[in-house]
Amino acid sequence: MAPDVAKARPDLDRQLAGLDALELAGNTRRDRRTRVWSSTWPKLGALALALGIWQALVWAEWKPEYVFPGPGEVFPKLWDRVQDGSMAETFATTMQRALIGFAISVVVGGLIGAAVAQFRVLRAAIGSLITGLQTLPSIVWLPFAVLLYGTTEQAIMFVVVLGAAPSIANGLISGVDYTPPILLRAGKVMGLRGVNYYRHLLLPATLPAFVTGLKQGWAFAWRSLMAGELIVNFGRASLGAQLGSDRDVNDAPGLIATMIVILCIGVLVDLAFGAADRALRNRWGLNTD
């Protein structure tokens, strides 16, 4: 190494260290407690506001209380069902169907999306069909599913998978489409081929869009499941069947209690997907919170 270069090297190292420190300072994140509180208090405020509006409508006698009961009747009803185990039974059945159906949808949608994204002839043949299936309300498949399988678990799985798989496939296809070409060329120049190409380049690059597709797929699967359980009795106690039963006997507190449970499940799943999305953005250095 030339003497002038060796002399300049310590100065260069100090300058680079200073730049690294500036970059790290810019990415300093708030502590965990502050972040949790900043995301929790708006939700608690919205919940308190909703309960207040609900109770105000009851006090204003907007509807008779046997049709529109207040929180004072609904939450005790919910607690009774929790204590006698009926809510746990319906919750378990519905979640089992939802998770199994969604898992099948991820496999089916992922395989179809990967195939369509890689082969032009497949994209030309069924690319538009996938989008069409995504826009088709999955509940319209229910009569056909019952015709094929009867009122069995296979019928409700059929509806759930057809509701979720197109969104998951489209998410993966979009991820591949929006991957920068220069990134793909760089990977090939670096020698990525075969499985390594997918493992180290294509899958990480498509992950954000794929996560979005999974979230949409879950939403479609959940809606399909609720509609299917509500319309057809598949022989087991479930949240959708409980809604139908409460409606038949005019049990408004029980009906709203079941709706609250369904809403809470949706919120929790959204939080789970949000956590996964934040973890992904942190890994990519895109989260500045």
Image (spheres, rainbow, N blue to C red):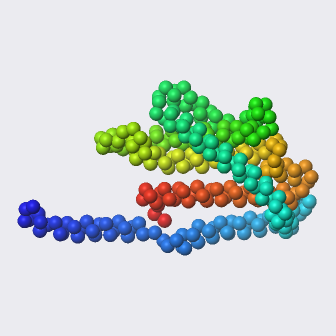
For this rendering, which residue is in front, 93 or 23? 93
Q: Image check: 247 left or right of 101? A: right
Q: Position of residue 237 (x, y in %)?
A: 82, 50
Q: Position of residue 6 (x, y in %)?
A: 12, 66
Image: 181 above or below 83: above
Q: Position of residue 232 (x, y in %)?
A: 82, 41
Q: Image check: 193 left or right of 286? A: left
Q: Position of residue 168 (x, y in %)?
A: 58, 42
Q: Residue at x 54, y 57 (%)?
A: 276
Task: Determine if residue 183 is in view.
Answer: yes
Residue 53's image quarter?
Answer: bottom right
Image: 119 above or below 273: above
Task: Determine if residue 139 is in view.
Answer: no
Looking at the rendered structure, the number of numbered marks drawn on it comes to 0
Q: Residue at x 78, y 45 (%)?
A: 229
Image: 121 above or below 71: above
